[in-house]
Amino acid sequence: MIRKLLPQEFRDKNLSLGNLFEFIRFILMGSIGALSYLFFSNLYDFLGAPTFLSPFYAWISGLIIVYFGHMKFTYRVAANHQKMAWKFLIVQTYNLVMSTFSTIIVHDWLNLSYFIASIVALMCTVPVLYLAGKFWVYKSS
């Protein structure tokens, strides 16, 4: 039933260990992106950047790491920046908007803990980010 909802390319492939390892690499790269965000956010704050700009600078720094990390490590495709870069920015904009929106709804409107809000944000973004990366942004053609 769920397979019918997936893109045709994914349905044609058997779910294999290769796909599982690719998803694990995706999670590892996402974790590296999150850690780089924490590192750069604190670094820019330490260097005296205004508080409202430190997270933005950190997000930009993290984008660079995650873009190349997913290209080379997660999906293992050759670079085609003219096609991939703008698609990546669209997907990451979705990530930023959906994470923020879901966090506001769960934490501020439903008055649940920030931790629960973070889990909901991950549940709303990770599957979409993985599938968009695999079948659109980093699609080898």
Image: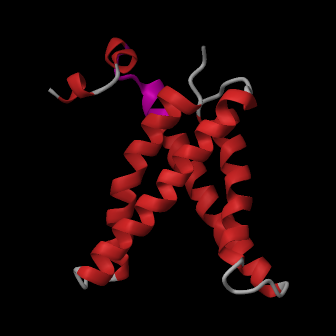
In the displayed structure image, the side of residue 83 where residue 9 appears, left or right: left
| Residues in magenta, as a range | 13-22
Q: How is the image coloured?
A: secondary structure
Residue at point 72%, 80% (across, down): 42
Q: Position of residue 26 (x, y in %)?
A: 53, 43
Q: Position of residue 88 (x, y in %)?
A: 60, 41
Residue at point 71%, 77% (across, down): 54
Residue 46 lies in magenta, yes or no?
Answer: no
Query: Height in image: 91 above or below 103?
Result: above
In the displayed structure image, the side of residue 5 where residue 34 appears, left or right: right
- Magenta part mainly helix, strand or loop? helix
Q: Give the position of the C terminus as an image quadrant.
A: top right
Q: Position of residue 15 (x, y in %)?
A: 35, 23
Residue at point 71%, 78% (across, down): 53
Query: Height in image: 131 above or below 104?
Result: above
In the displayed structure image, the side of residue 83 where residue 128 appears, left or right: left
In the displayed structure image, the side of residue 92 where residue 37 appears, left or right: right
Picture quadrant of residue 1? top left
How many badges with numbers are in the image? 0
Q: Position of residue 131 (x, y in %)?
A: 43, 35
Query: Height in image: 43 above or below 84?
Result: below
Residue at point 40%, 16% (across, down): 9
Residue 19 lies in magenta, yes or no?
Answer: yes
Q: Going by the picture, which residue comes out furthest to the right?
A: 47
> Along the line of sight, which residue is nearer the eye, 123 or 23?
123
Query: Height in image: 85 above or below 7?
Result: below
